[in-house]
Amino acid sequence: MEKYKILIVEDDIVFAEATKTRLLEMGYLVSDTVTSAEEAIRSVRDDPPDLVLMDIVLNGEMDGIDAASQIRQISNIPVIYVTGYVNDEFLLRAKLTTPLGYVCKPFDTEALKAVIEVALYRHSMETVLRKRRMRMCDWRPKTNSSRRLKAWAAWPGPSPTISTIISRQ
């Protein structure tokens, strides 16, 4: 099994340490444990992890959703929200950042491992598809339709539906 590096963003130090212990027992590496959105962004820049476990409510000016949005702008690192808060506002804002998971605290180790494994697999498959789409677009003539294809190939999340592509033209 490949050793994936995971960044833990959690303001509850006791919960962060317990999560770190669980991740290490599951065979993952923990790249860093931080308590604020600003530290998370800095950690991603300094030592990019393979995945981020992000609490939503954090210390500091930004929350975890804001941090995930900024991380998404600077890298293609998948985020899984791990939070004790489930309400419509958080869920709506969280969905806009295209996370690869949303886990409610408290959780059991098996559930966390399943969410992480599915997220890592899905992210790797989307990366392969994105690269294939980019290669497919490179041989096409440089026309307006080619620009649309490149935009489609660079789509950050799952492949858009045909209605999404048409509505963006």
Image (tube, rainbow, N blue to C red):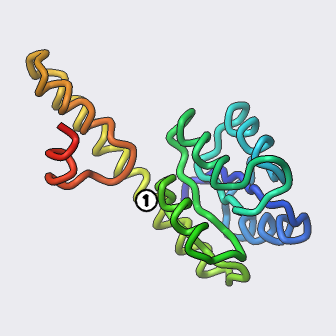
Q: Foreground: 141 or 6?
A: 141
Q: Residue at x 62, y 64 (%)?
A: 81
Circle 1: residue type = Tyr
Q: Residue at x 80, y 58 (%)?
A: 58
- The location of residue 167, given as percent across then percent down, is 18, 46
Secondary structure at badge 1 equals: helix
Q: Residue at x 35, y 49 (%)?
A: 126
**Depicted 61 relative to depicted 122: above or below:** above
- The location of residue 67, given as percent across then percent down, is 67, 47
Q: Residue at x 20, y 25 (%)?
A: 147
Q: Foreground: 62 or 115?
A: 62
Q: Quadrant of residue 49?
A: top right
Residue sitting farthest toward the front: 89
- The location of residue 25, given as percent across then percent down, is 74, 70
Q: Which residue is mark 1?
A: 121
Direction from residue 10 to residue 103 in the image, left or right: left
Q: Foreground: 7 or 169?
A: 169
- The location of residue 12, given as percent across then percent down, is 87, 66
